[in-house]
Image (cartoon, rainbow, N blue to C red):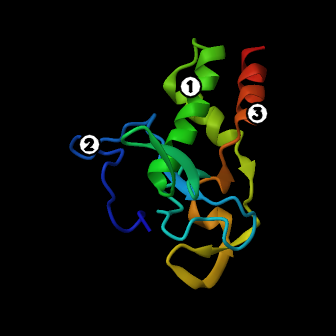
Amino acid sequence: NIDNKDNFPNKKPLKGKCVKSWIEVGSSTWTPAELMISDFSNYGKKSIDIFAPGSDIYSTTPENEYKMLSGTSMAAPVVTGVAALVMTYYPELTAQEVKDILINSAADFKKLRVDIPGESQELVKFKKLGKNGGVVNAYNAIRLAQEKKQ
């Protein structure tokens, strides 16, 4: 729970001042059920902005190879890719506007009961493990960006 324990890097790099456009990402799985949040993922109602697939991602590795990898280091590039997609179509948006679009367009799993990562004995609503209880959604993000620009 990164609400209670710092995790680095974080959005407070300079004397406790927040970088407002920083996006803190948690890792989700491909299963919309109790195991939807990756068992290794960070979480925190005050800290995690959005979740993204980060388990069993087929990714590049050194020496021209591919492997199945898992981690928030796999989830963060998914969010980055969706942000880049939004900015490609709407380059006039600020970083803060893109962040807001990603969060407000996330696939809603607020009411889904999930395991707390690392504590599989307790089920809680997804919304208690992050700020918005959602998983990044590229289609919804583009639609919301388009609506905001009309």
Report the amino acid beneath label 1. Ala
Q: Earlier in the sequence, mark 1 or mark 3?
A: 1
**Observer-nearest of 139 and 93:** 139
Q: Nearer the viewer, mark 2 or mark 1?
A: 1
Q: Which residue is rendered at x = 63% and y = 24% of the image?
A: 86
**Observer-nearest of 79 and 67:** 67
Measured as percent of width and height from the top left, residue 8 is found at: 30, 53
Residue matched to label 1? 84
Report, in whole angstroms, how far the alpha carbon at label 2 lies from the one at label 3.
32 Å
Q: Please indicate whether residue 32 sits to the left or right of residue 64 in the image.
A: right
**Observer-nearest of 27 and 21:** 27
Q: Please indicate whether residue 43 sits to the left or right of residue 123 in the image.
A: left
Q: Secondary structure at mark 2?
A: loop
Q: How many marks?
A: 3
Query: Where, quadrant-wise, is the C terminus in this rendering?
Result: top right
* Category of crowding for the residue at label 3, using alpha-carbon neighbours closer than 10 angstroms: few (below 14), some (14–19), many (at least 20): some
Measured as percent of width and height from the top left, residue 32 is found at: 75, 63
Residue matched to label 3? 139
